[in-house]
Structures are given as structure tokens and as C-alpha cells.
Image (cartoon, grey):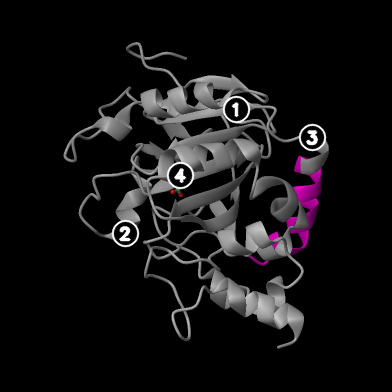
């Protein structure tokens, strides 16, 4: 899988924190195989099955007319809430990549279906969505969960390892991107500065993925979780998950409500019937 000596580091479930940190520092990406048990992959697909048919396909070249991205994964999938959102490998990676910030959040979670005929997506950095000059630090970390095997033929994400350290104007040249081939149940991690894009699906298989992105707390989240999941909607969720979707300050004096209070109090008060 190596191209010009660059490759996507591969780890197994049970990897050490040091191995993960080393892979992310060196390559800006890695594949962790066996991160999710097969039964949990099935359970997540079952959680989302009632919702996907009514999701429109992408309506821009970037979003792809051969791709369906179904939202509200956090609310719709108990499996996502219990087993993916706070997965220990993802949390360790998030702390390593985003721990320089006062805090960090889940930024969005989408369920992706990539159908036959979808061409290769433009290679990009996810940080471009902010429409801002480069921040000079990593602000995003992606966890792309393989819900089916990812093969080169069915559109495995194409990644340019090491591109997180490139100077702002450098662009990938032909042949620098590598398919992140990964068995079902793997998670592909890549930072916001890594060039990547969905691959072309030339098979009859539907490539399924869950894309969960985490971002530093001083940036606006991509998905407006506090609108989707007001305090009454999250009252039964774990405290850690509630904080992770944004019920926590984003900086020493950022993301408060009322008299400069931590937004988590909104959920606690709802629970206690105040
Ligand atoms: O589907 C994929 O493999 C990657 C999609 C992606 O990078 C994006 O939509 O930003
Ligand atoms: Fe992307």
C-alpha cells in the first residue's frame, strides 16, 4: 500500500496510546482494525435503517449524487451513543490531536452510503469548511467508521499520509493519495489537515460508513447539536456524552449561558425538575 515510502499506519484494537500518538504525529492518519465488534456494526446499521430511504442524495459535486448522508446519528442510534461516540481509541486520538485546546466536542456524526457510480471526491482538507485562513494548529479529528469492508473498488477513502504537515499552498499530486483499505469494523482516523476524499465506487456494493468528526471547542460545531438535542432530549444520556455534544464551555470565557454558567447546568436542572 506504500507510495513513495508513505503509507497509512495500521493498528489493531488494544494498541498502545504511544503507538496511536506516533501514527497520528507521523502520518496524520491511521486505520485501527477490529475497533468495533461485528454485532455492533449490525446494530448501528439497524438503528439507522428506518431513516435512510428518505434521505436525499448529495446535490453538489462535493456531496456527490452517488452519496447519501443521513444526519441525526447521535439521536437516532443508541449504538452510536454507547459504543462509537466515546470509543477509547477515538478519545485518545482526540486528546492527542485536540488536547491543546481548552476543550473539544463532537462536531457532527453522519451515516454515509456510497453507491455504485460515485466518482472520486475532490481531495480536500476538512478544515476548508471553516472558510478561514489556516489556524496553525489541528482543529478537527475525523473518525470514519467502516460499516462495510472498505476496498479500493468500492470507494475506500483516499488519504494523503503526511499531508498534515504541508505548507498551506501545497496540493497533492497524482499518485500521492492512497486508498484506506479497511475491514468492516475498522475506524479510519485522520486529522483536519490531512488531504483526503471519498474513492470511486465501481462495484455493486454500497460502501457504508459513519463519519464522526471532533473539533476544538472554540470553533462552531458543524452540526447544531444544541438545536437538535435540547436539554429534555439528552436528560437520560451519559454526562460525558452530553458534554461532548456541546454542553460544556469552549474556552475559559466561551460558550456560557445566563450569568456566565456552564451549559451543562441546563441539563442538570432539567433532570432535577428545577
Ligand atoms: O466518504 C469518504 O470516504 C470521505 C468523505 C469526505 O471526506 C467528506 O465528505 O468530507
Ligand atoms: Fe472530508
The residue shown at (38%, 27%) is 25
Q: Nearer the viewer, residue 185 or 198?
A: 185
Image quadrant where residue 97 sits: top left
The residue shown at (25%, 50%) is 135
- Of callouts 4 and 1, the N-terminal one: 1
In the image, the segment drawn in magenta is 41-55
From the image, tell me which residue sits under label 2.
130
Other-residue count near label 1 (Cα within 10 Å), few / some / many at <14 / 14–19 / ≥20: many
Alpha carbon distance from label 3 to label 1: 14 Å
Please state the horizontal and vertical placement of residue 244, each as a whole percent of the image. Answer: 57, 58
Please state the horizontal and vertical placement of residue 65, each as a whole percent of the image. Answer: 49, 54
Other-residue count near label 4 (Cα within 10 Å), few / some / many at <14 / 14–19 / ≥20: many
Label 4: which secondary element: strand
Q: Is residue 1 left or right of residue 16?
A: left
Most common secondary structure along the magenta stretch: helix
Please state the horizontal and vertical placement of residue 223, each as a whole percent of the image. Answer: 50, 65
Amino acid at each position: 500500500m506504500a507510495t513513495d515510502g508513505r503509507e497509512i499506519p495500521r493498528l489493531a484494537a488494544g494498541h498502545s496510546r504511544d503507538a496511536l500518538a506516533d501514527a497520528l504525529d507521523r502520518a496524520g492518519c491511521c486505520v485501527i482494525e477490529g475497533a468495533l465488534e461485528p454485532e455492533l456494526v449490525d446494530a448501528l446499521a439497524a438503528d439507522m435503517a428506518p431513516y435512510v430511504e428518505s434521505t436525499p442524495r448529495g446535490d453538489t459535486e462535493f456531496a456527490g449524487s452517488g452519496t447519501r448522508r443521513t444526519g441525526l446519528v447521535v439521536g437516532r442510534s443508541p449504538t452510536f451513543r454507547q459504543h462509537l461516540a466515546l470509543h477509547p481509541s477515538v478519545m485518545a486520538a482526540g486528546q492527542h490531536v485536540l488536547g491543546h485546546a481548552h476543550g473539544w466536542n463532537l462536531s457532527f456524526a453522519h451515516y454515509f452510503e456510497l453507491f455504485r457510480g460515485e466518482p472520486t471526491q475532490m481531495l480536500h482538507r476538512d478544515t476548508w469548511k471553516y472558510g478561514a485562513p489556516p489556524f496553525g494548529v489541528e482543529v478537527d479529528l475525523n473518525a470514519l467508521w467502516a460499516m462495510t469492508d472498505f476496498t479500493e473498488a468500492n470507494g475506500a477513502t483516499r488519504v494523503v499520509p503526511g499531508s498534515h504537515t504541508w505548507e498551506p499552498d501545497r496540493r497533492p499530486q497524482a499518485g500521492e493519495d492512497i486508498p484506506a483499505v479497511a475491514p468492516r469494523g475498522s475506524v479510519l482516523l485522520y486529522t483536519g489537515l490531512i488531504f483526503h476524499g471519498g474513492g470511486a465506487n465501481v462495484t455493486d456494493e454500497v460502501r457504508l460508513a459513519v463519519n464522526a468528526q471532533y473539533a476544538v471547542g472554540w470553533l462552531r460545531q458543524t452540526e447544531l447539536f444544541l438545536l437538535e438535542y435540547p436539554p429534555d432530549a439528552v436528560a437520560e444520556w451519559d454526562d460525558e456524552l452530553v458534554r461532548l455534544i456541546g454542553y460544556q464551555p469552549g474556552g475559559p470565557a466561551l460558550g456560557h449561558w445566563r450569568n456566565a454558567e456552564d451549559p451543562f447546568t441546563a441539563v442538570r436542572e432539567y433532570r432535577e425538575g428545577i
